[in-house]
Image (tube, helix red, strand yellow):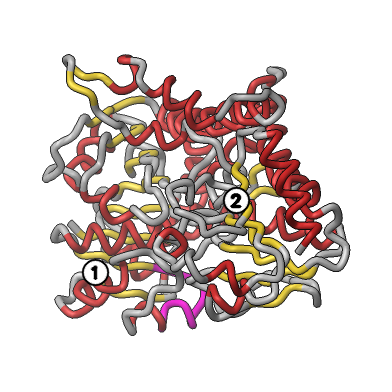
């Protein structure tokens, strides 16, 4: 099939490249000429494992190209996806990009004969597709819905695993205006062997929000248990949640033990971030209030998430006595390993807390050797090229992102580069490391009182 994708951000370009990879003809449209040029030169505007290679292949075999010309792209296709951003403004969703895309698609359809399906893949609040998008297309195309198809097709792509998630989906949800719309969109996915859910437009919109809100809730639940363990002697959140994981309803299938991916969200850490979970939970909270529903659980989810970075910094402050003038190595900037996305990253909140306490921050992330684009940083933040450089002369190191490089590092010698050998693990990522003598290693979700007292005494003597 011939496909047009409006918006070449994370969802749009990944979707386009993967659709081209299974044999469809894809035109990616973006308003930024420099981004279009980069894509046509096989340079992805963001980091995603395997994406550059697939992009290069799709360009080489002629199945994908990028352009700024929306009207001609729509005219040349059978299905147009809206994959533009839906950022938040003061906690509410901004649908201006979706509205603009729908308006331009409608204008293009005015001069197009034949049946054409418009599918929203951007994450939008329930009621957006059958009101805002539909109305804009009808107004500018001069056609009634039914003369063109209308679908809502949410994405379930995890940053760092998006290629595999697209090519091996666990479900495909198609919200449809009518059966004809849904049948056309289903043809795109006929090669996939997974449940395909045909439902209303609003159900499809809500499925996306419910999915992400559940994941965020699991994380905040885990972090609330961690907070309780941090004030309860002889408890350890990893042991506690490990016992929870063994519930057969979570990890047992027909008597055989499995480890489903959802369990990775039932682990304590320093909070969730990225472009999806915070934005989507906040958008659903705002939508709930607009409908006169109090989202008590989702409010708590976000409140707990906001607390975690400060707790991690307090752990460092308690161990050192004061952060004023201390040099702290911040290990990891991306909100998770496998991506260069720093949006809502816990690392940024940790950085701001450290700076407010008077610390000097040395940041190291394998993806970044300088400040990420668009990030304004304090003069007391320094970006390092290597892990060793970040640790040199540091009073403490805070592990924020679970990069494999950190787990594989030479921790027998690296702490020797530090002024005071304090390692605080915000992900409990390095618990299997055999630390050399003199290193104080502190985890989250645990209150080893004697160890903390000993740590303070040892640090004071260094």
- Residue 33 in magenta stretch: yes
Between disc 2 and disc 1, the foreground one is 2
- In the rendered image, which quarter is residue 293 located in? top right
Q: Say which quadrant the N terminus sits in.
A: bottom left
Label 2, secondary structure: give it.
strand
Question: Would you name the residue on which mark 1 appears?
Answer: 54
Q: Does residue 422 appear in this view? A: yes
Residue for point 28% across, 64% down: 17
| Image quadrant where one finds the C terminus | bottom right
Residue 205 visible: no
106 relative position to 167: left or right: right
Q: Which of the 4 image quarters holds residue 100?
A: bottom right
- In front of the other: 380 or 288: 380
Start-end of magenta stretch: 29-37
Q: Alpha-carbon neighbours of circle 2 within 10 Å: few (<14), some, or many (≥20)?
A: some
Q: Tell me the residue that label 2 is attached to.
A: 441
């Amino acid at each position: 099939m011939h496909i047009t994708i409006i918006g070449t951000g994370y969802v749009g370009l990944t979707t386009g490249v993967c659709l081209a990879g299974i044999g469809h003809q894809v035109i990616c449209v973006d308003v930024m000429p420099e981004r279009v040029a980069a894509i046509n030169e096989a340079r992805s505007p963001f980091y995603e494992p395997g994406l550059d290679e697939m992009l290069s292949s799709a360009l080489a075999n002629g199945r994908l190209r990028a352009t700024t010309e929306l009207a001609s792209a729509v005219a040349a296709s059978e299905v147009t996806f809206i994959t533009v951003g839906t950022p938040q403004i003061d906690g509410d969703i901004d649908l201006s990009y979706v509205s603009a895309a729908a308006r331009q698609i409608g204008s293009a359809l005015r001069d197009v004969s034949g049946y054409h399906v418009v599918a929203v893949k951007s994450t939008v609040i329930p009621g957006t597709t059958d009101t805002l998008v539909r109305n804009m297309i009808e107004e500018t195309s001069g056609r009634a819905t039914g003369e063109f198809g209308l679908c809502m097709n949410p994405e379930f792509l995890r940053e760092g695993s998006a290629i595999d998630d697209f090519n091996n989906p666990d479900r495909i949800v198609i919200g449809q205006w009518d059966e004809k719309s849904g049948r056309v969109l289903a043809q795109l996915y006929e090669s996939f062997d997974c449940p395909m859910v045909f439902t209303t437009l609003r159900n499809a919109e809500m499925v996306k929000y419910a999915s992400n809100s559940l994941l965020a809730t699991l994380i905040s639940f885990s972090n609330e248990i961690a907070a309780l363990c941090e004030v309860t002697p002889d408890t350890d959140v990893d042991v506690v949640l490990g016992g929870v994981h063994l519930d057969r309803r979570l990890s047992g299938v027909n008597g055989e033990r499995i480890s489903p991916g959802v369990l990775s969200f039932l682990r304590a850490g320093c909070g969730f971030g990225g472009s999806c979970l915070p934005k989507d939970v906040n958008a659903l909270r705002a939508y709930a209030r607009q409908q006169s529903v109090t989202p008590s659980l989702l409010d708590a989810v976000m409140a707990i998430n906001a607390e975690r970075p400060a707790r991690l910094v307090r752990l460092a402050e308690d161990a050192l006595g004061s952060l004023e003038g201390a040099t702290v190595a911040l290990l990891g900037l991306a909100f998770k390993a496998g991506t260069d996305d720093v949006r809502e990253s816990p690392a940024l909140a940790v950085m701001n807390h450290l700076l407010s306490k008077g610390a000097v921050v040395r940041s190291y992330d394998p993806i970044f050797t300088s400040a990420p684009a668009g990030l304004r940083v304090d003069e007391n933040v320094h970006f390092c090229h290597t892990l060793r450089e970040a640790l040199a002369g540091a009073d403490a190191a805070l592990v924020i992102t679970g990069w494999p490089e950190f787990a594989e590092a030479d921790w027998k010698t690296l702490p020797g580069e530090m002024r005071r050998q304090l390692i605080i693990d915000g992900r409990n990522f390095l618990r299997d490391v055999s630390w050399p003598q003199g290193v104080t290693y502190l985890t989250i979700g645990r209150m080893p009182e004697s160890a903390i007292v000993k740590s303070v005494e040892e640090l004071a003597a260094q």
